Amino acid sequence: MSLLETTDLVKRYPVRHRLTRRRIGEVSAVDGVDLAVDRGETLGLVGESGCGKSTVGRLLTRLDTPTSGTVRFDGRDIGPLREDELRPVRRDLQIVFQDPFSSLNPRHTVRQLLSAPFRYQGLEPTEPVEDLLKRVGLKPEHASRYPHEFSGGQAQRIGIARALALRPRLVLCDEPVSALDVSVQAQILNLLRDLQDELGLSYVFIAHDLGAVRQVSTRVAVMYLGVVVESADRDALFGRAAHPYTHALLSAVPVPNPDVERGRERIVLRGDPPSPLNPPSGCRFRTRCPKAADVCAVERPVLREIAPGHRVACHFPEERTP
Amino acid sequence: MTVLPITRPADVPPLRRLLRQPSAAVALVVVVLLVLMAVFAPLLVWTSPTEFDSAAVDPALGGLPRGAFGGISAEHPLGVEPVSGRDVLARIVYGARVSLLIAVLATLVSVVVGTVLGLVAGFFGGVVDAVVGRLMDLLMSFPSLIFMIALISALPEANREALLVLVLGGFGWPYVGRIVRGQAMVLARGEFVAAARALGAPRRALLLREVLPNLTTPVLVVATMSIPGYIATEAGLSFLGVGVRPPTPSWGQMIASAVPWYAADPAYFLIPGGFLFVTVLAFNVLGDAVRDVLDPRSVRR
Amino acid sequence: MSLLSVRGLTVDFPSGVRAVDGLDLDVEAGRVLGVVGESGSGKSVTSLAVLGLLRNARVSGEIRFAGQDLLSLGPKAMRALRGDRMAMVFQDPLSCLNPYYPVAFQIAEAYRAHRRASRKAAHALAVSMLERVGIPEARRRARSYPHEFSGGMRQRVMIAMALCLEPDLLVADEPTTALDVTVQAQVLDLLRDLRERSGTAIMLITHDMGVVAGLADDVVVMHGGKRVEAGPVREVFHSPVTAYTRGLLDCVPRVDGPLPHRLPTVEVP
Amino acid sequence: MSQCTRVGLVAVVGMLALTACNGSRAQGGSTGEAVRGGTLHVLASTDLEHLDPARNYVTSSQNVARLIYRTLTTVAPKPGQAGGEIVPDLATDTGRPSDGAKTWTFTLKDGVKFEDGQPITSKDVKYGVERSFAPDLPEGAPYARMWLVGGDRYKGPYENPGGLASIETPDDKTIVFRLNRPVADFGSAASLPLFAPVPKEQDTGVGYDGRPVSSGPYKIEKFEPKKRLELVRNTHWDPKTDEVRKGLPDRVVLELNLDPAVVDQRLVAGQGADAEAIAMEPIGAATVGRVVNDPALKDRLITGESINTRFLTLNTRRAPLDNVKVRQAIAFALDKDALRTVRGGPIAGDIATTLLPPGLAGHAADDQFPSADGKGDVAKAKALLAEAGLAQGFAVTLDAPSTAGGKAQGEAVQAALGRVGITVTINAISPSAFYSTIANTAQMHDMAIDGWTPDWAGPSTYLPLIFDSRLITSEGNNNHSQYHSDAVNKRFDEIAALADPAAAATAYGELAKQIARDVPVVPFLWDKAAILVGPKVAGAYGHVAYVGRVDLATVGLRK
Amino acid sequence: MILYTARRLVGAAGILLVICALTFAVFYLMPADPAQGACGKACSPERIAQIRATLGLDQPLPTQFAAYLGGIVAGRTYGSLECGFPCLGFSFQTNQPVWDALTSRLPTSVSIAAGAALLWLLVGCTAGVVAALRRGTVWDRAAMIAALGGVSLPIYLTALLSQYVLVVQLGWLPYPREVALTDDPVGWFQSMLMPWCTLAMLYAGVYARITRSEVLENLGRDYVRTARAKGLPEVTVLRRHALRPALMPVVTIFGMDLGALLGGALITESVYGLPGVGKLAADAINSADQPVILGVTLFAAAFVVLANVAVDLVYALLDPRVRTV
């Protein structure tokens, strides 16, 4: 049994008119997503903006309630739980946010921030604030400072320390490095890796940066317009991507090597992702897909296994081997 | 990628930054002096604000003060009221008590009510927000001055000061509530609130520990900015005859009673009017400076 | 002689911050210069200084554009150059387009600021520019407002606006940072294509080494307002002289190649 | 009675407005002959409460109404006490009593017409009186309802179209009133507006207030209540039938509801159209100084006499004011001079020492609570309080109108009584509610700022109305002090039975002294009205029936 | 958009309904009994009862309220009296239909409000723009000090002072009085000048400050930088890209201020003794004239509420982002 598992997860939001506040439709931010994270594993969740990956993150941690489908943590469906029933679960299920500054209350000192987990859980602190700081590479004397006195990287370390305070089993990292400079990104990614080794954590790592996902994940799922189009082990995905979208995505990432960059065959997708308000029929990627055929407009491809652990939702998956 | 960090020039304490602006420093001094004057009124003047001095006015001239500039003399440094001969200085000093107390208490009422309702509305949204929002719309659509006058003249005379505080605060809180609601709405969707929720924080803690402390700045700014408005409104109500009861002096009342006299004895309206102007100005300058110092939005500008 | 030649550029802000400190760089006609650096390295300030768009800052040193010393030019002469012979594309196309005017108007406005043209002619030109940067149904979309476009389309509009007067130099400040990878690829393609067709020199400012590798001919690496390293892209990428440049190249997690357990980190000079 | 009351209301309530009366000798500013023509402007700080003759019961409205409609009798167009004389108007004489003054007969003059040229008949007068019974048209003088036979059951012409039988019109010229008791001065009552003719076909009910039909020299061209009234000549008015009105100006324009201070200042400046203007109300205290010090202005100031007395009412039913010694102490403690200063000083009138003012028949000099300059005798007051066992003082509540003037008077009382240890709390009541509040025995507190003007220049509409304990009602009470004396009540009945008006007046004068000893009220001011007129105004004098205001019926403009 | 407008108007009507109900209720707290007031002093209890019946005061409160509301939409009759649509009742004091009283006073209020608004917009916005463009200079500081000073000046003080200096001492202006623009334009102008300036002084400061901060905010916007990068002349940059967006909030606040002002320039009209709607309200409150108080309150509230709707609609028309979904 997986530590965290979702079945047919759906989240719809009402869309309101800007002026009249009238409901004019519905966005299926997440439309039937199945995911599983095993103990000690890192699931990378990748996709472009608006693909629903962050919504999945909020559903996994129950910051949002799913419209339908289940989220099982440690075998228990946490979807319908009330806030007070959820509280013990939250000890095991923590989050690191994208923007370290906006996720740290500017009015609280680091000490207050790092003792908040215990206070909110009604627990005695098991670990002094100073130790938590040291664990994430900060100095104990930082405890009395306010968030704005730190650099972005340092602040993100505080966010990580807070997430780890309760010794969770799974940490959801929602774009943890995309707000940071490249040099700091590397440090944070290394820190996450070290902590995983040390504490046996599981991660769900949400990012749009394929390089960062590759760096930390053991398994990767690719999302497009609210659905998972492909999921596989890291090496399988980056080496033998089967979905045309995954291919396009990988080919679009510029590589810091002029020779590679200039020489390579590039798949440049046409147009923009369609609006999730009115997604295309059948395969959602068909409007931009170089391989689209008539069937794609009619039949929605299901996620099927094409190799052990490698699942893809496409009528015409790539069969290439490296 | 460039990310705008939330910069807060907190290295210098706010008060010191406030005092660095000369105008704000002067305003602060004026406000402090006024408050001291109001608090220590009995020590400052020995004359009673309600004592008649018929020797200081000339009945043959309709009660015009004897002497120049509204009867300024050693005995009456700011002159006397026509007809009654009451000491203007004493009335100014005691009037400051009434004016300031009402303004401060009305601010308190509006800030407390506005913050609580605005916070709840902004944080919870939905039905609560709709109800509070409607209430604020309603109160802000009221022709409040007309209604205040009608209301005050309709209610029993029991305690005019308390009534004024309640009415001013009652019509004033939506302006606080609107700001708090907007901020609370943004904050409630903020990541640090999500982080606290993820840590299992109960709602009460979210409201009081996470959101509320971040509202102190806008609330403090709007409170400082609203005091001069209340001073002026209280004076206006007194001016229109529904302010504090005589013989309690209030600046608005003094100006109102000076209206028929403005041509015969201009000093009589210039003195309380001047005090009122200086007070309102000082509070306005101060409020402005407080906003500049505390509001990151204006710092950026 | 270089099209743009910057010597000893120093920019000081009233707060006492020296954002650029003695920077030298050259953009050759028809070539692409990549300027890379992390946030705070002074790369954006440099671009604004070149266009003369810095307000409240003291700019010293020398900026020569086609032989003219820009720092000694009056505001009027600078204005005549801006938009006409050198144009700029910014990072966030949403905030850089005025929400109150249709896109074609904003393009035509740029054109009419420098060339005598009727409203109608300028509009027609704007439509053709929109077509050129790959906006489908350009004639209809010309009258749309910025918020009705997607991020990638907006950036195309910005590029159309910058190129409508066929400038000699295009300064592109993080033109793809706000975009998704697939859209970024489209825009980079567009830039590459435009440059090949028009021969416009580009000063490309970015933090992304991959983007530089894909587009630039030469590169300047900046850190702390100073030039750390400069040279042709191939040289700098294959054999960086400084540890900082090497670190920048290595610390980026990649989608190809070997996968280190831990990423190398950057040594700050 | 209510005329006075209402006058009292207007005067007490109006912002520092002064009411004045007695001794109209002043003809200031009226040098030169008034000629026919021009537009007379009247600047009023008050409003015309009602122009409907059935409802018109306030002196300022009556003054204006005299330009528009005629009554059976009216007051003589003369300055001073002579203005109190009743003279014929529509009628050929001031009424012929019979049946022991229980039947009164009037005959209409020939040639009197409404503004549309229709002749005025006795039926129009009868209809006018009947209208005053209609509940839709309240506020008018009560005499028709009080005195006419069957008046207690009649509900006015709208509900009882048959009319009131006790008003007979044997022919178009004759009208006979049958009364339920002898009324010696019914001829005086017939000068009130409710005795004006109203043509039945043109009665618009409540709406008649806005456009009454003219029988006098002017008709209404435009009326915007609380803003403006414009009068133009009524061409069907025949001056030969009217010995009272002169009708000199071609137009009369009243600007209503102006700020009193603005009225004063405009008249002080006297520029442009304001040169042809007169003030409706007396000058405010703030203007006194400027007028007194400026001979040119003083020349334009008219001092009109009034029969209004201002007093402080003491509630004789509430402890400790139920003790006559306490009331006497208050009478000694009151600073009448300060109260007069509030109203403008000596120019606003004389300090009152008796209930009946000098201009009223029956006035007899008296001063039972003398003090130097009217400033009060604190020592005597304290001694009386000590006698009453209240040397340490006590607290009372004073009802005063919530106007600036009302509050100022309240504060003057507060300051004066404070000198003898009496703490006064002012209960400021909105002016509109003031009289109904103190007329409610449950709501009236210990004291009230009060006053009285008789309906005509005789004491019969004064003392009996406010000191007869048998007239006390829980609401609408006029005996605000709730004064009760069986001896006084008995004397009222005896005087009412006297046939000779002069003897009755003297008797009232003596009775006033007796009442004053019980101190139900403390008189402090006999009003005068100091009124400014523009430099081009001629023939203006203050009329005693209109509490000293300029007689509009005779004033004109100079060449 | 039409649907939205309709919905907003319905909402506005709802707010007015509640305001109407509250004002109605408040009036019944007043100590003055309108029937007794109308009856005068020599009044018997029976007579009061009769008057009550005629005025409908003997009905239960909700019935009276319903009758009132009915009158507004369809007119009503009082006894023998016809009150046509829109019937706000008759004044107890003058028997004039409240609607006529309001409309006859509106020209004065409109004259005051419109002139003052024009003046303060001109002065305030100009000062704000100048201050923003000359930021940090003497101009800026002077404008902002003047603005704060203007905001701090109570109307009655300015009014009395101006009247004392300009009318009493210097005699440059006549005392303000009601003059119709069509009768005597010069007199109208002379009478209105002081009220305009007095009000404008109060508001111009607010507008100067708003304009300044909005212009400054817009000058810092990326699209202004874009406009400069395009090589647009500075004047065009300012006018097109900084001022136009900056005026949006000004328009918003202006709409609301104007709505509020039309409803009750209570103090201005009282001090200058001009017979506008505000003066009508003050007089009505003093005489407990319920129908007039109700009428003015509703009338004023209607202006505020409608101004709110209008502002939102104008906003929708001016801002393309709101206009299209």
Image (spheres, grey):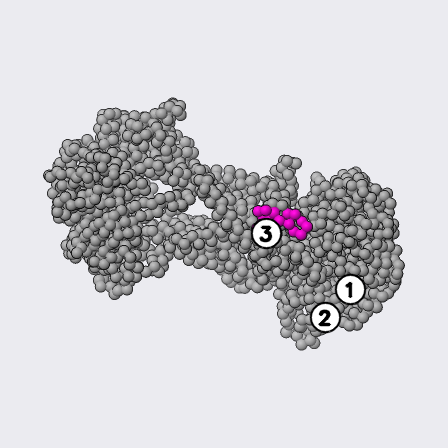
- Residue D228 sits in quarter: top right
Quarter of the figure with residue D230: top right
> In the image, is residue D346 part of the stretch drawn in magenta?
no
x and y percentages locating residue A188 in the rendered image: 20, 49
Could you tell me how far apart the alpha carbons at marks 2 and 3 are, in whole angstroms? 52 Å
Residue at image coords 65%, 36%: E184
Residue C262, percent across and down? 14, 48
Q: Secondary structure at mark 3?
A: helix
Marking on residue E68:
3
Disc number placed over residue C231 in the picture, else none: none
Question: Is C205 drawn above or below residue A226 in the view shown?
Answer: above
Q: Position of residue E174 (x, y in %)?
A: 65, 41
For the N terminus of chain D, the image quarter is bottom right
The numbered disc on residue D328 is 2
Q: What amino acid type is highlighted by mark number 2?
A: Gln
Residue extent of the magenta highlight: E68-83
Return the residue at label 1.
Answer: D463
The three-letter code of the residue at mark 1 reads Leu
Q: Amino acid at mark 3?
A: Tyr
The reply, left or right, for residue C126 in relation to residue C21 is right
- Residue D366 appearing in the image: yes
Q: Which is in the foreground here, disc 2 or disc 3? A: 3
Q: Residues within 10 Å of mark 1 (few under 14, many from 20)?
A: many
Dot 2: chain letter: D
